[in-house]
């Protein structure tokens, strides 16, 4: 089974830039899409018809706020069930530092979970801490706590394959300029600690499992100062899988040559 994850930074614009051609060429069994910034009914009629003509079932979770956030999954196999957001009964409310309980509601369209016979497939768009770190506390004490508990809640039923724009570079090897970014959003101690927590909880970073020491491998580049051409980037897009699936992993890869977004696709091949 081949699965892809891609923050497209706007699905309507990306479709006009050969997204459908990439989908046909890559031909993944599943693709988790983040930052769709729109609803399926906002696609042009031609794009809707073209997407509907593919072999994929479509699952969309748009944000309530127009042009913001949002996720989608395309799957060659119809899911047994689908859920949106983080269910309230999947985490211990007393352990989560609620500033505002509505912050975990589904209005930002950040999570889609598909259930299949052998596993759950989750696509996620993690909240960004923002350049001024205004959302770091929420990210650290609310979102990551609740979401990790949610993954473990799913895992108690069957293995989990999770893909997302995690908005954090885990180790110094995962960004081009670690020394200059120690208190930048995406490389703070708090965000990196939560990536440690996912791994300590038994989830496997598939790319680093396959290529533990491979340098200069990034998934996001700023639009500023020709960062992508110079490969001054960050690896902030991940596939994490349950430890019980580790021996089934065949490959973890980054498609850095695929353009049309400030992120590139990442993926796995896994034998199920």
Image: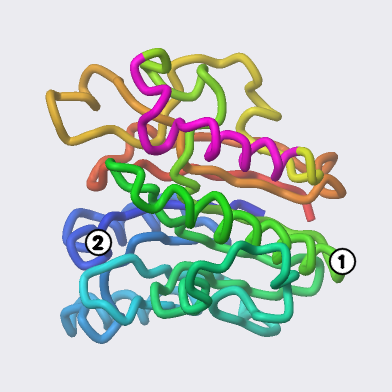
Circle nearer the viewer, 2 or 1: 1
- State left or right for residue 209 relative to residue 222: right
Residue named by callout 2: 10
Type of secondary structure dominating the magenta stretch = helix
In percent of width and height, residue 63 lies at: 35, 76
In percent of width and height, residue 154 lies at: 77, 68
Task: Compare residues 196 and 77 and report the one nearer the observer.
Answer: 196
Q: Is residue 162 above or below residue 39?
A: above
Label 1 crowd (10 A; few <14 / some 14-19 / many >=20): few
Which image quarter: residue 38?
A: bottom left
What residue is rendered at 32% in x and 40% in y?
A: 258
What quarter of the picture does the N terminus occupy? bottom right
What residue is rendered at 22% in x and 77% in y?
A: 66
**Extent of the magenta region:** 180-199
- Circles 2 and 1, Cβ within 8 Å, touching? The answer is no
Residue named by callout 1: 156
What residue is rendered at 56% in x and 34% in y?
A: 192
Determine the secondary structure under disc 1. loop
- State left or right for residue 38 relative to residue 85: left
Does the stretch in magenta take in 195? Answer: yes
- State left or right for residue 139 relative to residue 210: left
User: Marks 2 and 1, Cα distance to the nearest angstrom?
Assistant: 34 Å
- State left or right for residue 49 relative to residue 101: left
In percent of width and height, residue 132 lies at: 28, 42
What quarter of the picture does the C terminus occupy? bottom right
């Amino acid at each position: 089974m081949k699965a892809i994850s891609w923050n497209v930074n706007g699905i309507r614009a990306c479709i006009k830039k050969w997204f459908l051609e990439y989908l046909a060429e890559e031909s993944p069994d599943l693709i988790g899409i983040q930052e769709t910034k729109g609803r399926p009914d906002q696609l042009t009629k031609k794009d809707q018809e073209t997407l509907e003509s593919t072999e994929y079932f479509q699952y969309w979770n748009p944000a309530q706020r127009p042009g913001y956030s949002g996720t989608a999954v395309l799957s060659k196999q119809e899911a047994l069930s689908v859920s949106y957001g983080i269910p309230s009964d999947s985490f211990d409310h007393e352990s989560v530092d609620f500033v505002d309980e509505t912050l975990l509601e589904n209005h930002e369209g950040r999570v889609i979970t598909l259930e299949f016979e052998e596993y759950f497939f989750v696509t996620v768009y993690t909240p960004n801490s923002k350049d001024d770190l205004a959302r770091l506390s929420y990210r650290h004490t609310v979102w990551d706590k609740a979401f990790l508990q949610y993954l473990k809640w799913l895992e108690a039923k069957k293995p989990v394959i999770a893909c997302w724009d995690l908005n954090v570079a885990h180790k110094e090897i995962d960004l081009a300029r670690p020394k200059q970014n120690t208190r930048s959003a995406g490389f703070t101690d708090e965000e990196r600690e939560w990536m440690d927590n996912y791994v300590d909880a038994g989830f496997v970073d598939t790319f680093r499992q396959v290529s533990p020491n491979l340098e200069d491998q990034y998934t996001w580049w700023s639009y500023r100062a020709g960062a992508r051409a110079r490969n001054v980037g960050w690896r902030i897009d991940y596939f994490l899988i349950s430890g019980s699936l580790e021996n089934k992993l065949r490959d973890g890869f980054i498609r850095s040559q695929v353009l049309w977004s400030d992120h590139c696709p990442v993926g796995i091949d896994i034998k199920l």
